[in-house]
Amino acid sequence: MASPTSSSPRAASPTASRLEEIRQLMLNDGEHKNSTLYRLQKGWLLHFVLGPDLQARKVRVFSNHPPHGSNKPFSRHEFYELGWQSPSKSQCDDSDNFCEIQLHQAGSFQYYFTSDNCNNQLGSGYFIVDPVLTLSSDMDVLPLDCITLQTVLMKCLGPFSEWEKRLSVAKEAGYNMIHFTPIQQLGDSNSSYSLRDQLMLHETLHGDGKKVTFDQVEALVKKMQNEWGMLSVCDVVWNHTSFDSPWLMEHPECAYNVVNAPHLRPAYVLDRILWHFTLDIIEGKWESKGIPKIVNNEEQLNRIHNELTWAVIPKHRLEEYYQCNVDIILELFRDAAGTSDTVFEIRLCEPADVKLNQDPDYRRLRCYVDLHKALQCFNIKRDDSLTEPARLEKCCSAFRAHLEELNKKAAEVMFDDLRNAVNNVIANMRYFHLEAHGPHLEEVTKENPCVRKYFRHWGPDTSVRDEELLMNEDKAPFLQIGNGWVMNADPLANFAEPPAKVYLRRELICWGDSVKLRYGNRPEECPYLWEHMLKYTRQVAKIFHGVRIDNCHNTPIHVAEYLLDEARKVRPDLYVIAELFTSSEYTDNMFVNRMGINSLIREAMSAGDSHEEGRLVYRYGGLPVGSFLQPHVRPLQPSVAHALFMDITHDNQCPIQVRSVYDLLPSAALVSMACCAVGSTRGYDELVSHQIHVVDENRHYTSWNESSNVDPTCEVGFNSGIIAAKRALNLLHQWLGDMKYSQVYVDQVDEHIVAVTRHCPNSHQSVILVARTAFRHPSNPHYTGHVPPLCVPGIIDEIILEAKMVQINPEPIAKCATHINGMSNYSVELQQHIKLLASGMCELSDHGADTNAPVQEIDFINFPPGSCIAFKVSLKNSARGSLSALRNCISQFGYRVRSLSGNSPSIPRDLDFAGIASKLSLADMNRVLYRCEVEERDDGKGYGPYHVPKFGSLVYCGLQGYMSLLAKIRSTNDLGHPLCENLRQGDWMPGVIANRLKAHARTRQLGKWFEAVFQPLSRVPRYLIPCYFDAVMVGAYTVVLEMCWKKMGPFVNEGSSFVRALALGSVQMCSVVKTAPLPELSPSLSGIPTNINEESGKREQEVVTMAAGLPHFAAGFMRCWGRDTFIAMPGLMLLTERFDEAKYIILAFAGTLRHGVIPNLLGGGVHARYNCRDAVWFWLYCIQLYCKMSKEGTALLECPVSRIFPSDDSEAQPAGFTEQKLCDVVHEALQRHVEGISYRERHAGVGLDQNMSHQGFNVTVGVDPVTGFPFGGSEYNCGTWMDKVGESERAGTKGKPATPRDGSAVEIVGLCKAALHWLSQLNEDGKYPYSDFSVRIDGKPCKLTYKEWDAKIKAHFEQNFWVPPDANKQANKLINKRGMYKDSVGATQFWADYQLRPNYPIAMVVAPELFVPEHAWIALQTCEKYLLGPLGMKTLDPEDWGYVGDYDNSYDGPDGKRARGFNYHLGPEWVWPIGYFLRAKLHFSRLQDKQPDLFRETVTGVQKILTRHHKEVSTSVWRGIPELTNSKGKYCKDSCPTQAWSMSCILELLYDLDKLVKSNVGGK
């Protein structure tokens, strides 16, 4: 491995073979992310995916990133539409679709998206693709995080012939990039940033009379790149030019002046007033007023303030620029008002509408008003005037008063502007003359005036009056504004443009040597300037590898965009840096995004103490140490702007002046440890004790001399300043970046000492640098004092470097007149690549020498201020071996991790997780993935959901409980989460995962696998445990999910992520629970799953039952509901192809048939409760679906059924005692209904149901002989899914059913029709032995065929259930809603038949032939209008008197509608009915012949609705869909967070949708 402080191989080219990196950017409606920063790399793929609110919409995505392979150049305003791709075969939803960009160009790119054939942008944003910087070859890549940059002032390099020897200092100091200030011709001020001619080289380059060309500079830059391994960047200055630029004389329009920006005219006059005031002070004209030339106290400033405010400025009447000429306007008004057609009866507008409009040319007293409005307001008939002249005079008087009031207000505005201007003048003088940190000027002179001139003045100083007249002469375009900066200004607004008043209010800190350039909005507005700057920019981009945008925050963004686009045409991988002073990350990102800035300059000198400096190191790059392993395909996360972190920039004071000389080394060391680009300014390393000023400095830099005989006045070598240490630090920084030490940890050891760790996640080696800062000069530079010991997690391989600042002479040599020399009396003591025993700074403590200890403890014995030391740390062999074992393990999951050397611990050979998992059934997967607390406790093994201290318990005991939480933690890298802390503190969590699975025979092998994998996990450093724990869990979890889906058939396995997520509800809900067993099946039935009970040694039936919902209905008597099971079975068991288990459940419930019905609550069969009317019908419907969907088909009807209760009154019998075929049981159920059913529940009373009334235990069911409708129930009980019985004694509802729904419930009628129709058809086909029933009519026995019963229902359904849109409410007072189907027929509570509820769509799905298609569509529209919620369906019309939308089962107050959850089905929005509702819409939309586009529109509408369910199942910690929500989709605390039938019905809907779309039905 290469040494960290010697030359090291660069990172491989990005085109090298590697896994494809994919980032997914989710699009959401209304998200314009112009201030969100996304950083990407060339060679990556960017996928745009749809957020929930955009799925099912026709979204079009556009980007200006040129298509890969098109060879099209980038054009900011040319956008390309991206095509959609789908990774799944599902056609039911668009959730997995994506658009792709192959990123092959560097720069700033934009995207936007539209929808539904509309061109309005629904959202937009930017993404930045970093450039690939190469050195000697394309394979020699310089990553941005490896950059070590040094800034040099071009003018201090001297003649071009001497550049190499001066630039060699940077090369030898280990820098790999040089930042040049502009090399172009400088202006009169000699400022490095005030350019006279942007297209000419500066004169200093042409030494000895030899003219240097740009080509020669380019040749040197290439030599530095190819031979020195150094890249170069140069400033570009676009915002201003020197006031003496010759091209300004020919093109004054290129600068802001009083002609092209007339709003500046008052500011120009004020500028001249202040200048003449300065001249008068210089001439002593104000001494009599106590204002001398020498200004050195606050009293003098107060006098200046007073005189300017009340004497000097007012006499020039600047307010006239804001005012009108009252007499002239009044005369115009008088002339117009004299004509009769302009006299108004009443005012047509108010005086406030007659406003003063600013003269666009800003002339004195030339403001104006809208004369038409003035006439409407003031030229009116008046009762106080008898003659027309008198009326006119009064109107003119009123108008004059209004104009004078407007002028008065204008004067107040100007006075406020001037008050601010005077205050700023005084503040400026206070800084320069009085303040401690100012330059302490005394005398007012032309060179040091009261305040700098804002305007370039033309001609001699005459008088303010005469100079004001210049604004109207041909020299006016040369009255140009200077440039500078404005504190706290909006950087996105141009302060030289209106409505800004920066120049009038004197808010600009003016540089005094340059003018601000005026580009306009496009090149056509100032063609010369745009073309001139374009040539300049292209020249710079041709020579240099990057640019630094000077004064970036004041540069018009649209100008920078244009010029950078052109620069990238010259150099596609242009590196762009800038320094912004916006104090806002939001605004910074706006600049970064639009310009494509690659690195923002940040400065360590902004830190006030070591704690803040350490925070900046952490802030500007790197991931936390121990970060999670991230997949190669992952969501694109917002970034912090990449930093170029500098110990000092060339604009700021020398740190020796503001801190101490002892701080330069430790602060430089801390900066070098930042995981970003780093840099410095020439002079820092040489210990130059003053700022090398960009304006005033004219001396040359020193040159490099490798010999020991160095002239300190003009030369430097390795022994000069901190150059040797800086070289070591620069090489260390580059090595850390090259070797991917990408994780950072910063520890504030004490007030002055900071420790920074850079960690490599590939090798798990670390570099720990400890620096002792000296923000103030230490009282005793040699004193170490108490330094807390350093605990090193591992073995110290070597000390990379240790260095400290030492004073070698009492005084430095004098400041050289010709060269910039540093403090020669200080130097650095440096050692590199030494063993710990050779250190002069630290030693291994006695405690740290323990070879078994997980850490080494280091004591500091000689670590005074100004010191730093860097340790290279490796893991102990035991930890390395354990990590190798872990990496070998997770590599099977697709992780690309490098193996570590070291002895691996002894672990079992069989670590093939997929091989072990493939042997598990879906029932086993339930234990592996899920099981809530109640299910787990039921096992009796002592396990439950893991409790995370300071967080709470997980929702599941299986992997999903951990993964739901880890997914959130991993996405934000939240290593401070309590779960991560728990992992670091101990091995309890991994132990529980393994031991829990080992406790069961079926999952024992998997538990042993986890145990074997988690053993080495316990031996790695604790800070790495969350990372590897997550990797193991993610890998195992992903494999288990794939195994589940593969067992579920093509619809699921090849389906979308939404389909797959819902299908997991089958695994979630179906499990073997001791206290809720399935009744014993027939002994003659083959293939029944069994298992040997390890406690009793007996073989037991082991067939899953289905929980109604978790966690409330998970175990015991309340787990398995007949109705819920068979509503959920089609989606969770049939569509997932769990046919065997579905068959066992169907046959088991058949065995419980009693009184012609199946149980509401299964109770193991023996303890079943028979108190529902609808379960038997959903059971029959599932039998029908099973026969249609499974390969077994109608052979199911021949399967044996063990009857638990051979007769209604018999006791429970063992399996095999009485057996029948399933077809016999089916016929019996129907026969009993035809005969009529009447019984009282066994064990009726409070022991069975503490809330039921005495009458409620009586059950009556029958079939209407006329209509064929099944009926039943009474006002005392509930026989359908809406089964809430009141529980509140306080509210008087105890024992009172909230929703009896007796009579013929609409969904039961539909289910009955479906069963009869199917069975009669089977009978005709010879697959079902029964054709009729025995009935008694008028006491006489007779036959009723299946077909006859079927026909009766068909014949009577519409006339009994349909409520037409034109139904007469007067004739039938019970009608509340029209255009609907009744909820029931024949209810005891007669109004209940007409209540609008979501039940008739169920009948529409199971028996669509019952409905007239046109009526059905109207009814569905009614349902949608009143009942449809975000996730579910309201269970009652919100306009019904009984509606209460929010369910709170804990409330037990006097409100009977709500008490103890009485309103369970009186408004709250249940999810499962929405599946039937939307399926009905899909079906009947195809049958509306008059609306050919209806089906397509319906599909789109359904898909839009389903996006909410997709989001719910994807983000819920339970990974399910809830039982219900409160009104408008609000969360309901008393709902099951995941419910079987909710997921099932949505899955069935997706299945229907998929089939319909694939079959292209309805012209889709």
Image: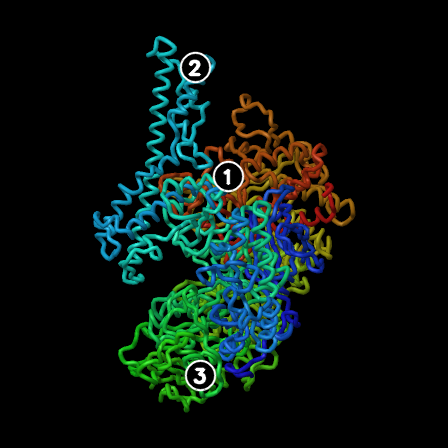
- Mark 2 or 1: in front is 2
Residue 1258: x %, y % from top left: 50, 42
Residue at figure coordinates x 35%, y 89% from the top left? 846
Residue, disc 3 = 801
Image quarter of the C terminus: top right
Q: Secondary structure at mark 1?
A: loop
Q: Residues within 10 Å of mark 3 (few under 14, many from 20)?
A: many
Q: Do tag 2 and tag 1 residues touch (Cβ < 8 Å)? A: no
Q: Give the CA separation, mark 2 to mark 1.
A: 85 Å
Image quarter of the N terminus: bottom right
Mark with earlier residue (1, 3): 3
Q: Do tag 3 and tag 2 residues touch (Cβ < 8 Å)? A: no
Residue, disc 1 = 1300
Q: Amino acid at mark 2?
A: Gly
Residue 1103: x %, y % from top left: 60, 62
Residue 1174: x %, y % from top left: 58, 44
312 relative to 1521, above or below: above
Mark with earlier residue (2, 1): 2
Location of residue 1433 (image quadrant): top right
Q: Residues within 10 Å of mark 1 (few under 14, many from 20)?
A: many
Q: Give the CA separation, mark 1 to mark 3.
A: 84 Å
Mark with earlier residue (3, 2): 2
Q: Is residue 90 left or right of residue 634?
A: right
Residue 443: x %, y % from top left: 28, 58
Q: Amino acid at mark 3?
A: Leu
Q: Give the CA separation, mark 3 to mark 2.
A: 95 Å
Q: Secondary structure at mark 2?
A: loop
Residue, disc 2 = 338
